[in-house]
């Protein structure tokens, strides 16, 4: 299927949007595993590859919704109706596939650097429970999107230290307390505030990172869930 092929190409994006909103919309990325598109700032210049109007109750719409958003179409459509981004006045959806246009060499270099070298903060318990790492997108504190990667830099930091606070704000743009609450929600058995600060590089093909390659965890006295 051509859509599957395009989705594997990082420069091709597929998205479902309400048909009545497409004329006034900004181009929004729709990465797999998310319900909503994220608004680019500034919007990316793109070339339209393909488009089609579909009904949200059709089997095709549901299949595309699971492929693009990893969510049933009824849930995506309901979320779209609640979102301030959309003024839905009909039940038609527009499937569009776009390709990003790169105009400058510097822009391409920046894109490649961002795509293949990511930084993240990971609690020790997350490392002990997972042999593969997730590259966290800016301002997202989830480990839902697992990718095989190699570590190109690492050091242990204390999340409440001055350096830890600085790194947290730079990577995620949120207060440390908010980050901790989100991590504790995902890993309720977390009993230390020691985190590993990683710089990762994606592998083109699947290579699993063994936890034995990581430094041993140091015992700390920081326990308890933040309020």
Image: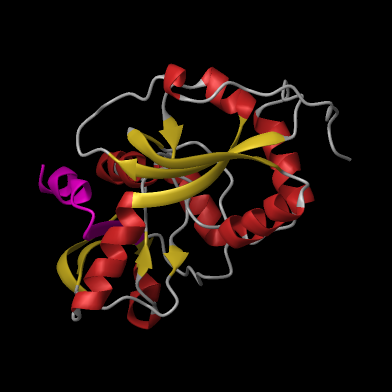
Looking at the image, the residue that sits furthest to the right is 227
- Colour mapping used in the image: secondary structure
Question: How many numbered circles does the render carry?
Answer: 0
Please name whichever residue, 72 or 123, is drawn nearer the observer in this view of the structure: 123
Is residue 94 visible in the rendered structure shown here? no
What percent of the width, then of the height, locates residue 163? 69, 54
In the displayed structure, does residue 185 sit left or right of residue 14?
Answer: right
Residue 175 x %, y %: 74, 57
Towards the viewer: 23 or 2: 2
Instruction: Name which residue lies at 50% across and 69% down.
Output: 86
Using the rendered view, name the quadrant where residue 57 is placed: top left
What percent of the width, then of the height, locates residue 118? 42, 50
Q: Can the viewer see residue 192?
A: yes
Magenta stretch encompasses residue 11: yes
Answer whether residue 69 is magenta in the image.
Answer: no
Q: In this view, does 128 lie above or below 25?
A: above
In the rendering, at what x and y percent does residue 156 appear? 61, 37
| Residue that appears at 37% across and 56% down | 30
Answer with the quarter of the image where residue 107 lies: bottom left
Quadrant where the image shows the C terminus: top right
Position of 196 relative to 217 (above/below): below
Q: Which residue lies furthest to the left in this view?
A: 2
Query: Would you identify the image quadrant in which residue 200 lies?
Result: top left
Image quarter in which the N terminus is found = top left
Return the residue nearer the eye: 136 or 36: 136
Instruction: Give left or right: position of 33 versus 206.
Output: right
Query: From the viewer's perspective, is residue 219 above or below residue 133?
Result: above
66 or 127: nearer the viewer: 127
| Residue that appears at 76% across and 49% down | 161
Q: Residue at x 42, y 72 (%)?
A: 40
In the image, which residues are magenta?
1-16
């Amino acid at each position: 299927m051509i859509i599957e092929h395009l989705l594997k190409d990082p420069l091709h994006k597929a998205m479902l949007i309400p048909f009545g909103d497409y004329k006034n919309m900004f181009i929004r990325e729709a990465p797999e595993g998310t319900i909503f598109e994220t608004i680019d700032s500034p919007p990316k210049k793109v070339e339209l590859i393909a488009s089609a109007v579909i009904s949200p109750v059709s089997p095709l719409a549901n299949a595309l919704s699971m492929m693009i958003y990893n969510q049933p179409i009824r849930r995506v459509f309901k979320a779209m109706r609640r979102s301030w981004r959309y003024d839905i006045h009909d039940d038609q959806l527009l499937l569009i596939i776009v390709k990003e246009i790169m105009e400058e060499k510097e822009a391409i270099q920046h894109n490649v650097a961002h795509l293949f070298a990511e930084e993240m903060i990971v609690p020790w318990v997350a490392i002990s429970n997972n042999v593969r790492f997730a590259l966290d997108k800016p301002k997202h504190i989830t480990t839902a999107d697992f990718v095989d990667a190699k570590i190109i830099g690492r050091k242990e930091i204390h999340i409440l230290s001055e350096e830890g606070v600085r790194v947290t704000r730079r990577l995620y743009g949120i207060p440390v307390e908010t980050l901790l609450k989100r991590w504790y929600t995902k890993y309720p058995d977390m009993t230390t505030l020691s985190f590993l600060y990683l710089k990762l590089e994606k592998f083109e093909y699947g290579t699993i990172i063994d936890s034995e390659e990581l430094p041993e965890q140091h015992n700390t006295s920081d326990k308890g869930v933040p309020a």
